[in-house]
Amino acid sequence: MAELPGAVPEPQAPARCMLCPRRCGADRRAEAGRCGAGGVLKIARAAPHFWEEPCISGSRGSGTVFFSHCALQCCYCQNYAISAEGLGREISTRRLAEIFLELEAKGVHNLNLVTATQWLPWVLPALKAARAAGCRLPVVYNTGGYETVETVRALGGVVDVWLADVKYCSPALSEEYSGAEDYFAVCRAAVGEMLAQAGPPQFDAEGLLQRGVILRHLALPGALQDSLAVLRWMAELKAQGGRFIPSLMSQYTPFYRAAEHKPLGRRISSWEYRQVVNAAVDLGLTEGYMQQKSSAREEYTPPFDLEGV
């Protein structure tokens, strides 16, 4: 495994945090932000992951780092132990750079950063140090889609693949389920910047995505009309020249506080998901991925046991 050349600078926590669309302004040197993140980098797992889209996971897995805390904190989050409850271990920026190199040594196809924005001041120097040590893996930025345009721009030249959710169009649903009435307006602007930055999808000889944007949509129970609205927006984006890979997901499982919201207390029905898939086909969103209904299983959520940390 390659060694890090020299020291890796340890950044100071933001004195007025504006990293995510919440723009809470917390002095993270002394307190946690609205997302729950404080002044020391924290992650929960770093290991090969095999349950992303095939062009990301490939045959050897995606080198996935799960960061603790999250700006959205959706009531149904399958990763709630780390996103909402803050499970994880505090590490240095140097240790994160070492983790990137260790994942590369395991033969993974890429570095997959899951919900990393609240730690951006630490992530950027860690990636820079790993690159200086010879790491050549594409960087995948795995995000809930709730990003500022400024953050997307700050990652220009660093991120190769944007793996972004488009969760909702409805302000009412995004407010109820994620506490973010502005979700779609924010996501739409961020996705526009991602597409401009990444350009059309580029694959290697093995069919692995090296550059581009994947837009995911998780179909929720009782939210068929909103899913159709998301798909219509994706189709409009495509018609305007947006080059991306759509990915429809049926894996919704009632986790965390989902049962507090009556429609979310069950899995999506086969009929509901079939309507979403049919609409995607009718709208021409066929050059991508559509999960099988059987994908709604708990084992797709990895154990957050601090592996690789």
Image (cartoon, helix red, strand yellow):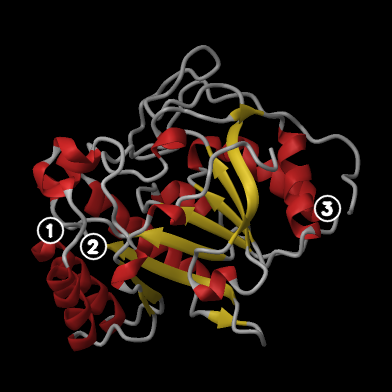
Circle on res. 242: none
In depth, the one of 100 and 308 nearer the eye is: 308
Q: Mark 2 against mark 3, which lies toward the viewer?
A: 2
Please tell me in which quadrant of the rendered image residue 61 appears. bottom right
Quadrant in the picture for the C terminus:
top right
In depth, the one of 166 and 28 nearer the eye is: 166
**Residue ID at (60%, 74%):** 58
Few, some or many residues within 10 Å of mark 3 (<14, 14–19, 20+): some
Quadrant in the picture for the N terminus:
bottom right
176 on left or right of 208 = left
Outermost residue toward the top in this view: 30
Circles 2 and 1, Cβ within 8 Å, touching? The answer is: yes
Say which amino acid is labelled 1.
Ala
Secondary structure, mark 3, is helix
**Residue ID at (29%, 59%):** 188
Label 1 to label 3: alpha-carbon separation: 46 Å
Say which amino acid is labelled 3.
Ala
| Residue 63 rendering spot, x and y as whole percentages | 65, 57
**Disc 3 designates what residue?**
132
**Disc 1 designates what residue?**
223
Label 2 to label 1: alpha-carbon separation: 7 Å
Secondary structure, mark 2, is loop
Circles 1 and 3, Cβ within 8 Å, touching? The answer is: no
Q: Is residue 181 visible?
A: no
**Disc 2 designates what residue?**
219
| Residue 300 rendering spot, x and y as whole percentages | 45, 56
Please tell me in which quadrant of the rendered image residue 50 appears. bottom right
